[in-house]
Image: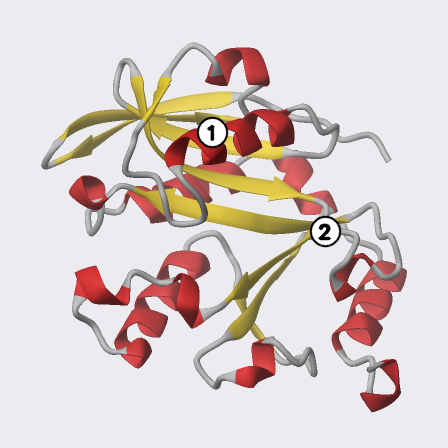
């Protein structure tokens, strides 16, 4: 499968200033900017930036960034699922995972996350993919937001829906370990029926798989 990527860039106005939201970006493009030190949801900012650079080298990967003229303040990544995850079981070339989305606190609540997702789906080639996102409540910034788990879940659902991702059932144990966790899915309009059926099978592998 050829992983075609069509770059696009827009300006997005926020109360904190104008941002550029663009991608998919390459390693060389990422290296032009400073990576904000508050982007620490998954690991220290320096290590997370190294991870993004490595992701950018993958043939299927897509990274969309939100930036000021010189600093990345948010991003969303897409890539094939980790080989250790159930979602790589059938090695589907047309399945990619929204691996991470993160925005610094200064720019939250202004639609940056939703715009990152909408921008990432503007590329017509995204219609060739099943896109998934695994949402786990322990990745959410509950302390800073002061929201309940369920109110935060509503916000996450609304943001993901802006990119066309909707909740889908699964028997995956880690997702089912807490009722706030969920699998989000977007099936592109060009995905063949055989891929949809294979994905449905993967969502429900049954107890014998474990």
Q: Is residue 25 left or right of residue 59?
A: left
Q: Give the crowd class for mark 1: few <14, some 14-19, many >=20 residues within 10 Å.
A: many
The residue furthest left is 15
Residue at 63% x, 32% y is 55
Q: Residue 35 location, x and y as percent?
A: 36, 25
Q: Is residue 37 left or right of residue 63?
A: left
Q: Which residue is mark 1?
A: 49
Residue at 77% x, 65% y is 86
Residue at 34% x, 39% y is 39
Q: Is residue 66 above or below residue 109?
A: above
Image marks 2 and 1: residues in contact by CB distance under 8 Å:
no
C-alpha distance separating marks 2 and 1? 18 Å
Element marked by disc 1: helix
Q: Which quadrant holds residue 72?
A: top left
Which quarter of the rendered picture does the N terminus lie within?
top right
Q: Nearer the viewer, residue 42 or 90?
A: 42
Q: Residue 30 location, x and y as percent?
A: 48, 18
Residue at 85% x, 59% y is 195
The residue furthest bottom is 207
Which quarter of the rendered picture does the C terminus lie within?
bottom right
Q: Give the crowd class for mark 2: few <14, some 14-19, many >=20 residues within 10 Å.
A: few
Q: Which residue is mark 2?
A: 82
First along the sequence among labels 2 and 1: 1
């Amino acid at each position: 499968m050829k992983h075609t990527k069509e770059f696009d860039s827009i300006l997005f106005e926020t109360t904190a200033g104008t941002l550029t939201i663009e991608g998919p970006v390459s390693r060389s493009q990422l290296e032009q900017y400073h990576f904000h030190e508050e982007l620490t949801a998954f690991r220290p900012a320096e290590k997370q930036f190294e991870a993004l650079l490595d992701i950018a080298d993958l043939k299927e990967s897509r990274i969309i960034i939100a930036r000021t003229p010189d600093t990345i303040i948010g991003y969303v990544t897409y890539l094939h699922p980790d080989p250790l995850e159930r979602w790589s079981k059938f090695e589907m070339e047309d399945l990619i995972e929204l691996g991470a989305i993160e925005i610094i606190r200064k720019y939250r609540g202004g639609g940056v996350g939703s715009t990152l997702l909408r921008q990432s789906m503007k590329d017509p080639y995204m219609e060739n993919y099943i896109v998934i996102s695994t949402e786990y409540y322990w990745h959410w910034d509950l302390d800073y937001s002061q929201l309940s788990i369920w109110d935060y879940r509503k916000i996450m659902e609304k943001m993901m829906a802006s990119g066309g991702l909707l909740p889908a059932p699964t028997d995956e144990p880690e997702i089912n370990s807490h009722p706030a966790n969920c699998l989000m899915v977007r099936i592109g309009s060009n995905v063949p029926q055989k891929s949809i059926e294979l994905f449905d099978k993967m969502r429900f592998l049954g107890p014998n798989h474990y």
